[in-house]
């Protein structure tokens, strides 16, 4: 049965005469199926007692972040969870010939394998990097570049901070550059890494920054530390700069943008992302063979326009108001 797709203040709703599917809702309703794609804070819902569809990994990470996904299950008949390659446990959802990507990456990055795109009639895709300027280098090239930077700094006795989001990029960085010794983790990253390891992710075990500093280990330079993304004005960064003369390397898909600044005062900015770049988004749409494409989250107008020029039927999914929304 065909579903009506609409974007509301409570996320994406796909409705037919018998039921509603809520995609990454902000609040859990009493009826329908509520799909939570992954455990980044902006995708986690609050309140409600309705049925939640999410991966086991997402449930565990959400719990660590202070969210309890009540009535959660990873299996409902006629709904298929698809690995989205964004972060550990992230999923897209295939149902009723609709594929919702959630946040998605089709490139392999360490322990994360790129998403395989299913065929569908209706595609709802994010387009965070839906402009042609966002074409990212291969991961192998990034690893080579960063290892050369670290090696050069090590030769000068300089410690290095690798900065990436606490959930997702920090774990990728921990694996890609885990061969450097010694390696430490910011306390928040250590907690997240420990949880990942408990669920089978092969990350190198190490101590947090508080323990390393209290034991005088940070005085024995050089070293590498993985920490959350922070600006140069953050007190932690200021402390590391002042006391240890640390060099910061920030990782973001925005790093090389000509229009959108990113650096946050980091010494180096490296274009590494947990999302598809522009070319990968185009390839994703092609592989889906969708008859209708809805664009969300990002450059929705520009990407939809480009898709239409390529012969697809695409439009931005725009928010509407629902009188009965609460």
Image (cartoon, rainbow, N blue to C red):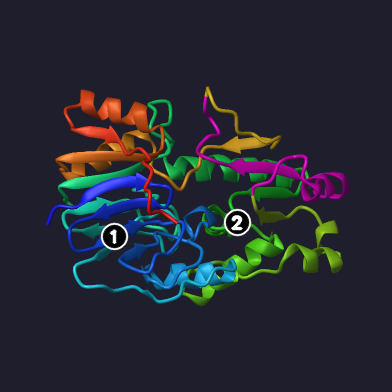
Give the mark, 1 or 2, whose residue is nearer the N terminus: 1
Which residue has dot 2 on it? 166
Where's the C terminus, which quadrant? bottom left
Q: Is residue 162 above or below residue 219?
A: above
| Residue 70 pos. (x, y %) | 45, 75
Residue at the far left in the pictured view: 1
**Mark 1 residue element:** strand
Q: Is residue 272 magenta?
A: no
Front of the two marks 1 and 2 = 1
Q: Which residue is mark 1?
A: 21
The part of the chain drawn in magenta is 229-257
Q: Residue at x 65, y 42 (%)?
A: 249
Give the CA separation, mark 1 to mark 2. Answer: 30 Å
At x 37% / y 48%, what residue is drawn?
A: 322
> Is 186 or 103 nearer to us in this picture?
103
Residue 233 part of the magenta segment: yes
């Amino acid at each position: 049965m065909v579903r009506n797709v609409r974007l509301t203040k409570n996320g994406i709703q796909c409705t037919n005469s018998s039921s509603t599917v809520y995609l990454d809702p902000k609040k859990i309703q009493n009826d329908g199926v509520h799909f939570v794609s992954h455990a980044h804070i902006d995708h986690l819902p609050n309140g409600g007692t309705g049925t939640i569809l999410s991966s086991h990994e997402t449930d565990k990470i959400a719990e660590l972040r202070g969210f309890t996904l009540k009535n959660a299950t990873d299996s409902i008949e006629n709904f298929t969870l698809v690995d989205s390659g964004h972060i550990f446990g992230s999923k897209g959802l295939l149902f009723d010939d609709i594929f919702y990507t959630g946040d998605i990456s089709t490139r392999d990055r360490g322990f994360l394998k790129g998403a395989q795109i299913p065929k569908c009639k209706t595609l709802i895709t994010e387009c965070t990097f839906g402009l042609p300027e966002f074409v990212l280098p291969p991961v192998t090239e990034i690893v080579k570049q960063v290892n050369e930077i670290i090696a050069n700094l090590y030769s000068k006795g300089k410690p290095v901070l690798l900065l990436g989001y606490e959930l997702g990029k920090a774990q990728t960085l921990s694996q890609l550059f885990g061969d450097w010794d010694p390696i430490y983790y910011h306390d928040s990253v250590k907690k997240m890494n420990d949880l990942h390891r408990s669920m089978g992710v092969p990350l190198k075990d190490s101590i947090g920054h508080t323990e390393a500093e209290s034991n005088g280990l940070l005085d024995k330079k050089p070293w590498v530390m993985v920490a959350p993304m922070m600006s140069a004005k953050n007190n932690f960064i200021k402390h590391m700069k002042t006391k240890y003369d640390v060099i910061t390397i920030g990782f973001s898909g925005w790093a090389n943008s000509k229009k959108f600044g990113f650096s946050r005062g980091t010494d180096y900015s490296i274009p590494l992302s947990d999302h598809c770049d522009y070319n990968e988004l185009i390839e994703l749409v092609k592989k889906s063979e969708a008859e209708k494409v809805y664009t969300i989250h990002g450059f929705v107008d520009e990407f939809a326009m480009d898709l239409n020029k390529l012969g697809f039927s695409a439009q931005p999914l725009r928010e509407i108001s629902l009188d009965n929304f609460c």
